[in-house]
Image: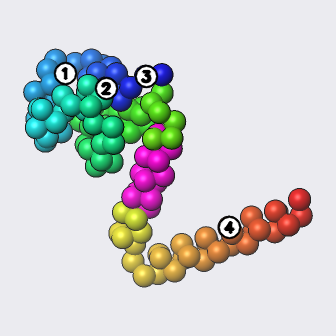
Amino acid sequence: MSTLGDNVEAAKTRKRIKTNAELAALVEMREGDLSRLLRNDDPNPELKTLLRLAKALDTSVESLIEGVDPEYAAKLRRDFSWDRLRELVSRMNDDQRRHLVTLLHAMLATENAETAVQ
């Protein structure tokens, strides 16, 4: 099983970032906080930290948490999905939101009908 620190270090190497200070500046966090994260001393980094790391390293949050504790990775995926959905919905106008609700209702009705047939 890999760690978040291992995955960040690998991405840092691919991006040719040589020092933690350089990465910390790109991510806009203190070098000490980044070092704790890389040593895996921070068992529950915030999603926004992972998003900033992924952006600075030209990678995805998924690749940063690949091989990490499965329960934690699943939690981050759920959090990321909901955060992303909230962000997208917040950018919609009222007509787009109504259309989305209509689509979701149709999807749920279809799923419920398929479940009932089985």
Q: Amino acid at mark 4?
A: Met
Q: Position of residue 53 (x, y in %)?
A: 26, 37
Q: Which residue is mark 1?
A: 17
In this view, the residue farthest toward the right is 117
Residue 50 makes an appearance in the image:
no
Q: Position of residue 27 (x, y in %)?
A: 18, 39
From the viewer's perspective, is the residue at label 4 or at label 2 nearer?
Answer: 2
**Crowding near pointer 2: few (<14 within 10 Å), some, many (20+)?**
many
- Span shown in magenta: 73-85
Q: Amino acid at mark 1?
A: Ile
Whole-Å distance between the Cαs marked 1 and 3?
A: 20 Å
Q: Residue at x 33, y 37 (%)?
A: 43
Helix, strand or loop for disc 3: loop
Q: Amino acid at mark 2?
A: Gly
Q: Which residue is mark 2?
A: 5
Q: Which mark is residue 107?
A: 4
